[in-house]
């Protein structure tokens, strides 16, 4: 397992709500009235997981209150886990022992797996560059609006898609195609900038992983 705890400028929920759907992984979200508390990604066989959660809320639940000195803290916990033996063998081609965790090569491999999992999660909140040298057709305009809405209002976007899915208006197969289209569109647009929150998070992750 690879994990880090990051002291963030804003509440962890503000970052977690910007975590989108990762290809070939299922996104699970736990939210309360105060916002997103946990986001977990798992593959179909359950061998690999990546989670982000509010560390302070976890401490509060365990200790039935906020410890002294933590009342104004914002801490985002990010964890990469290999849950099953088949997952360990898939990544390391053998079983691991507790002593292997002290092996620098094994530790660096876990760091790389952590970073790969983090970086392959699409992040919302981006602004898009519109190339005015090209003719913007009505179809292209609709695409730009849809993509900008998806990034500006991620919660509303997810809620709408989920409600349509639950009502049967959109099939699971169509949802897969929609998500594939989202990934294609992100590669096709030139991004001006990421969300300032994601920029902050990327920098923090890079520093802490030292890669």
Image: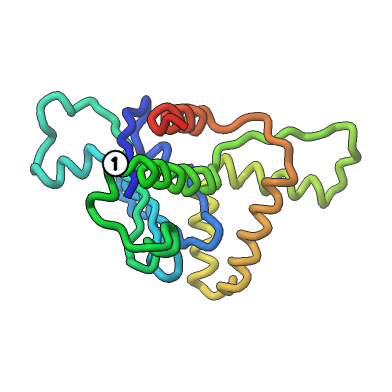
Task: Pick whichever, 162 or 202, lies toward us.
Answer: 202
Residue 203 location (% of width, % of height): 47, 27
Task: Pick whichever, 138 or 36, lies toward us.
Answer: 36
Instruction: Residue at 48%, 71% (x, y): give it.
Output: 166
Q: Does any portion of residue 35 appear in the rendered image?
A: no
Residue assigned mark 1: 54
Q: Quadrant of residue 56?
A: top left
**Is residue 132 shown left or right of residue 39?**
right
Residue 116 location (% of width, % of height): 50, 46
Task: Pick whichever, 178 or 110, lies toward us.
Answer: 110
Identify the element where label 1 is drawn.
strand
Instruction: Residue at 82%, 34% (x, y): give it.
Output: 131
Q: Is residue 203 above or below residue 155?
A: above
Instruction: Residue at 70%, 53% (x, y): give it.
Output: 184
Residue 145 location (% of width, % of height): 70, 44
**Is residue 33 shown left or right of residue 176?**
left
Residue 117 location (% of width, % of height): 47, 49
Q: Does any portion of residue 6 appear in the rendered image?
A: yes
Across the whole image, how many numbered discs are drawn on residues?
A: 1
Q: Is residue 96 above or below residue 7?
A: below
Q: Is residue 100 above or below residue 202?
A: below
Q: How is the image coloured?
A: rainbow
Instruction: Residue at 89%, 37% (x, y): give it.
Output: 134
Crowdedness near tag 1: few (<14), some (14–19) or many (≥20) residues, C-alpha within 10 Å = many
Task: Pick whichever, 33 or 7, lies toward us.
Answer: 7
């Amino acid at each position: 397992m690879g994990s880090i705890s990051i002291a963030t400028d804003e509440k962890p929920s503000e970052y977690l709500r910007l975590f989108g759907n990762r290809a070939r992984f299922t996104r699970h979200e736990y939210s309360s009235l105060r916002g997103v508390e946990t986001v977990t990604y798992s593959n179909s066989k359950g061998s690999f997981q990546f989670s982000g959660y509010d560390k302070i809320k976890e401490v509060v639940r365990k200790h039935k209150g906020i410890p002294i000195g933590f009342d104004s803290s914002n801490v985002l916990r990010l964890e990469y886990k290999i849950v099953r033996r088949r997952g360990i063998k898939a990544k390391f081609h053998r079983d691991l022992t507790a002593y292997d965790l002290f092996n620098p090569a094994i530790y660096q491999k876990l760091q790389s797996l952590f970073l790969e999992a983090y970086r392959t999660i699409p992040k919302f909140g981006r602004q898009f560059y519109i190339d005015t040298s090209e003719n913007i057709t009505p179809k292209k305009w609709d695409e730009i609006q849809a993509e900008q809405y998806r990034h500006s209002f991620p919660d509303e976007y997810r809620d709408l898609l989920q409600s349509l899915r639950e009502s049967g208006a959109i099939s699971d197969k169509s949802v897969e195609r929609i998500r594939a289209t989202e990934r294609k569109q992100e590669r096709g647009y030139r991004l001006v900038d990421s969300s300032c929150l994601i920029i902050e998070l990327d920098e923090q992750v890079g520093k802490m992983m030292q890669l």
